[in-house]
Image (spheres, grey):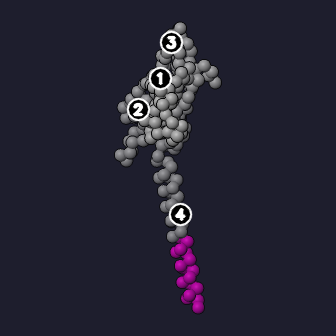
Amino acid sequence: MQTIIDIVDVLKIVVEVFAIIMGGIWTYYLFIEQRIKYPYVKIEHKINSVQINDDKLLLNVTVLVTNAGKSLVSLLSGMVIVRQVKPIPKSVEDALNSSSKDDLREGRVAGLFLEKGRRINWDEVGYRKLEWEKGEVTIEPGESEEFQLDFILDAFIKAVEIISYFKKAKRFNRETGWRLTSFYNVENPK
């Protein structure tokens, strides 16, 4: 009987050691491999405008990229696009007026929607492309990098959509990045 108890005690210890090892492996893959090695950024827009003469408006877009992860972020490129929302561009207004309510509701209007019916195809009124050599723009965990861009727009534009996209250095043959879209009301900035 004592031999069976000894065998059970040994098996209990082996099972506990195995469980501890498996828990350690699981923790490593969940928290180290999955969360720390992959960068995570937070993007914010700070937008200001001022009419500089009767015909032109200065739109200042500051993009703040914060490394909210635990690994170094290395940016390869970025872009900032400004699109006219108000007054509604003629192409958008024509598509709105010639489309059924169902097609508009479901994003099925060719030429009006982008990205499989998810976004309206506003007229582009400003564009900046940013490119860097690998390692030129790196952001340490908890740190931020600020990119300030000026756009000269026609003064009749009253509202815009701003899209920022930043691409990170490839890792494991994966090309990924981060995007933020904001709307800015020139008539009533907040």
Q: Earlier in the sequence, mark 1 or mark 3?
A: 3
The image shows residue 74, relative to residue 84, as above or below, that is below
Name the residue type under label 2: Ser
Amino acid type of the residue that numbered disc 3 sits on in the rendered structure: Lys
**x and y, in percent, of residue 152 in the image:** 48, 16
The residue sitting at 45% across, 22% down in the picture is: 126
Q: Mark 4 points at which residue?
A: 23
- Residue 168 visible at all: yes
Which of disc 4 and disc 1 is earlier in sequence? 4
Viewer-nearest of labels 2 and 4?
A: 2
Q: Label 2, on which residue? A: 77
Callouts 4 and 3 close, C-beta under 8 Å: no
Residue shown at 53% from the left, 8% from the top: 54
Q: Which of marks 1 and 4 is in front?
A: 1
Per the rendering, the mark at residue 56 is 3
- Give whichever of discs 1 and 2 has the lower sequence position: 2
Instruction: Point out the stretch of residues depicted in magenta.
Output: 1-17
